[in-house]
Amino acid sequence: MAELEGLQAGGASSESGDGIDLTILVPVYNEAGNILALIAETEAAFGEGRSAPFRYEILLVDDGSDAATQAELDSALAQCARVRVLRHSRRCGKSRALVSGFAQARGAWVQTLDGDLQNDPKDAADLWKRLHAPMPPETLGIVAGVRKRRNDGIVKFISSRTANRLRRWLLSDPALDTGCGFKLLRTDAARSLPYFDGMHRFLPALVNRAGYELMQVPVEDRPRGAGVSKYGFFGRAIAGLFDLFGVLWLQRRSSRISSVALVSERKRGVQP
């Protein structure tokens, strides 16, 4: 289980958790040079201060980063009132960082973005406006991004394409690009998902297993900002294969409920 340090919040905010519409959740590990730029882009896309058309927060989950990243997170806290930071005392992985963020999110929806600037906050802002004109259907649980162009090397591109095809075939999963970090989820649905390391690669299938529907939208995939990629090839491929069969087992061991109705005790002759 992740070792968590205290949640820190921007000092100038008077907002409580009530009434926040959206949590923008960003897991970060050694992303110095990207964090302040991502926050600036996010506020430019969604609106700054009281001019924002709805209430949102930016929740950054520090997965045991280096001192430079921690210093930039501290600067973000000082500069932006809507920023909150959750810190793991040691590195626990992207899936655990997301789950920690789901648990602390105050919004009814959670928008995940990667901390390397490859996801464009403008895509998230455009999606939010489209989805809430007027309101998303209650059956919708997740909106998954599909990258228009990939900024991956040839080895990563081929391995990702192969893994996607195998996953879609085995799980009957319609998600086209589950490796994309851009996802919008209902917070209640996100919190109900079973946790395991690597679950972030299977979020659409897991949300669908919980009884929700999937929507997919094209998004930009930009070159990484500062820093280097944190993911290797062989270790991730082997772990992903084991996880794939684990999710297949979960699917086959679950039952969907079409509806749940509470039968009044009065009908059973019990007086209230």
Image: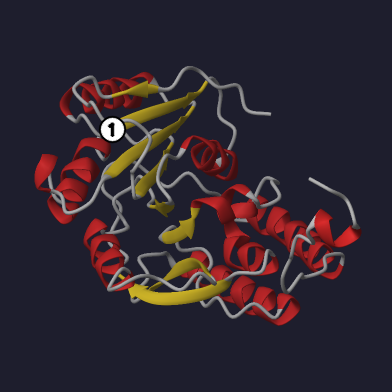
Relative to 117, is 73 above or below? above
Q: The N terminus is located in which quarter?
A: top right
Question: Residue 106, position in %: x, y?
Answer: 42, 39
Task: Determine the residue located farthest toward the right in the rendered image.
Answer: 269
Task: Determine the residue located farthest toward the left in the rendered image.
Answer: 51
Q: How many marks?
A: 1
Q: Is residue 95 left or right of residue 243?
A: left
| Residue at (38% x, 76% y) in the render | 217
| Residue at (28% x, 32% y) in the render | 83
Q: Is residue 93 left or right of residue 125?
A: right
Relative to 160, is 60 above or below? above
Label 1 element class: strand
Which one is nearer the viewer's eye here, 239 or 86?
86
Which one is nearer the viewer's eye here, 68 or 253?
253
Which one is nearer the viewer's eye here, 208 or 155?
208
| Residue type, mark 1 in image | Val
The image quarter containing residue 226 is: top left
| Residue at (37% x, 52% y) in the render | 113
Question: Residue 24, position in %: x, y?
Answer: 35, 47
User: Mark 1 Cα within 10 Å, few/some/many (few <14, many 20+)?
Assistant: many
Q: The C terminus is located in which quarter?
A: top right
Q: Is residue 250 left or right of residue 200?
A: right
| Residue at (50% x, 18% y) in the render | 5
Question: Residue 69, position in %: x, y?
Answer: 33, 27
Display coloring: secondary structure
| Residue wearing tag 1 | 83
Q: Is residue 155 left or right of residue 130?
A: right
Question: Residue 224, position in %: x, y?
Answer: 30, 52
Which one is nearer the viewer's eye here, 138 or 208?
138
The image quarter containing residue 211 is: bottom right
